[in-house]
Amino acid sequence: MALTPKQDRINRAIDDLLTNAELADFQAFLEADQEHAVLYDRLRDVDLLLRQPPAAAPAPDFSAKVMARIEAGEYRQYAPHAGLRRVLSWLVVVGVFVLIPTLIVLAIALPVMAQPGVFMNIFQQFVGSLGTVSAWMQGVLTFLSDLIATYPMAPALSLTIIPVVMLWAWLVWYLQQRNRPETVVIPVQVQA
């Protein structure tokens, strides 16, 4: 919305952008036009309030009232279903991590149980895969024992990695905590 020239002159006067000659002309204009003079006074008052807002102080018994409401448990009315929400969230967690996998296993196992040959084939595959895993683990353990026999300092060097990694993780955590803005505590004085 475009300002009229009169409104623009009022805004410039409020912002102290008028020269001395323009200011004198503006004063004469305000004396002649009462409507714009009222508008100028209102806008000047708003400008002063925005530039220097009054300091708002809490009531003397503000902290006592807040503490009384906390002790009375009034904050519970703002979250009346918090307990129910917590129970429902735990039920969802149980459902996701226990019931759904159980139902999937049952959905797969029940048709297989009806056919013993298929079940026996799956069981043999499972036992065979356990044998493969145990053979792989035995190979890894043999490699490690040969490595320790060849290089006796390898376990000591590998164990020094653990504190270094822990130190690095702590440093990352510490730096993140340091850059977090501090909580500002505003002391409130209670007047008796």
Image (cartoon, rainbow, N blue to C red):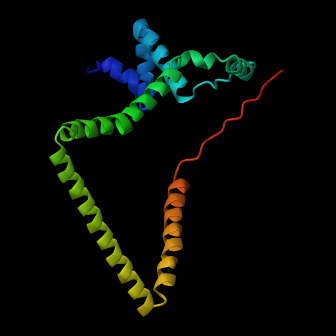
- Whether residue 16 appears in this view of the structure is no
Residue 137 lies, in percent from the top left, at 34, 72
Q: Residue at x 46, y 85 (%)?
A: 154
* Towards the viewer: 116 or 7: 116
Q: Is residue 80 left or right of residue 70?
A: left
Q: Residue at x 41, y 84 (%)?
A: 145
- Most extreme residue toward the right is 192
- Most extreme residue toward the front is 116
Q: Is residue 167 left or right of residue 121?
A: right
Q: Residue at x 67, y 35 (%)?
A: 186
Residue 73 lies, in percent from the top left, at 66, 18
Q: Is residue 123 above or below residue 145?
A: above
Q: Quadrant of residue 177?
A: bottom right
* Towards the viewer: 49 or 180: 180
- Most extreme residue toward the bottom is 150
Q: Quadrant of residue 3?
A: top left
Q: Is residue 44 above or below residue 125?
A: above
- Whether residue 94 appears in this view of the structure is yes
* Towards the viewer: 64 or 121: 121
Q: Is residue 113 above or below residue 58?
A: below
Residue 185 lies, in percent from the top left, at 66, 38
Q: Residue at x 18, y 44 (%)?
A: 116
Rendered-image quadrant of the N terminus? top left
Residue 20 lies, in percent from the top left, at 45, 30
Q: Quadrant of residue 136?
A: bottom left
